[in-house]
Amino acid sequence: MKLEIGQNVTIQSYKHDGSLHRTWLYSKVLDIKEDHFVVVNNKTWVVEADGRRWFTREPAVCFFYTNRWYNIISMIRKNGIYYYCNLASPSLYDGEAIKNIDYDLDVKVFPDQTDVILDEDEYLEHGKTMNYSDDVKAIVEHNLEELLKTIRSRQYPFDESVIQAYFRDYLAMMQHR
């Protein structure tokens, strides 16, 4: 089954050991590019591995790459756009959900374009307990460097006008359903 623009899709993130990490129940497919999917979720349920459920507070335009070891969630808040970038395996759609493996490291980017790397301790711990191979660690760490270059040079999608345009498209799509 192929992903289609306008369809609702579930997003599932797993851990390296195969356990389910987190599920976003409803996102709307907005765009399908050669190397990534763009989806929007807006006040959707998120279910954690331990069963805890929470509701997203703001709309988010999300970029799931099929050939890069990260994904990007841009959260539209009153005081600007925040980006939350997850170091993760390339994403795939298998007819059930957009899926990837989360590798713990995250980068948060603030509206003023400053960034901070998060969860380095979790990455090191899981690297040991889940036996990340040297190859996986090298790929994740290389993609972290590539992601930071992309962020700091404000390349797509780290441009507020890109996020606003996708969100306008989402609002128009929701009006015509």
Image (tube, helix red, strand yellow):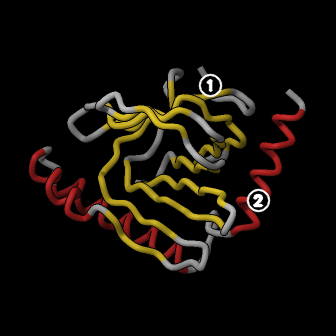
Name the kind of residue labelled 2 in the image. Answer: Gln
Residue on which disc 2 sits: 164
On the rendered structure, is 30 left or right of 13? right
On the rendered structure, is 128 left or right of 121? left
Q: Quadrant of the C terminus?
A: top right
Q: Residues within 10 Å of mark 1 (few under 14, many from 20)?
A: few
Report x, y in % for residue 62: 59, 49
Q: Earlier in the sequence, mark 2 or mark 1?
A: 1
Element type at marker 2?
A: helix
Residue on which disc 1 sits: 2
On the rendered structure, is 153 left or right of 149? right
Report x, y in % for residue 65: 52, 49
Foreground disc of the pair 2, 1: 2
Tell me, yes or no, if residue 35 can be seen here.
no
Quarter of the view holding residue 137: bottom left
Name the kind of residue labelled 1 in the image. Answer: Lys
Report x, y in % for residue 134: 16, 57
Report x, y in % for residue 5: 73, 33
Task: Please say if 92 is above or below 158.
Answer: above
Q: Residues within 10 Å of mark 2 (few under 14, many from 20)?
A: some
Front residue (pair 162, 51) = 51
Q: Determine the residue positioned at 62% across, 72% down.
A: 155
Element type at marker 1?
A: loop
On the rendered structure, is 80 left or right of 94? right
Q: Determine the residue positioned at 43% across, 32% down.
A: 53
Task: Please say if 94 is above or below 165.
Answer: above
Task: Please say if 53 is above or below 162.
Answer: above
Q: Determine the residue positioned at 64% across, 50% down.
A: 61
Quarter of the view holding residue 176: top right
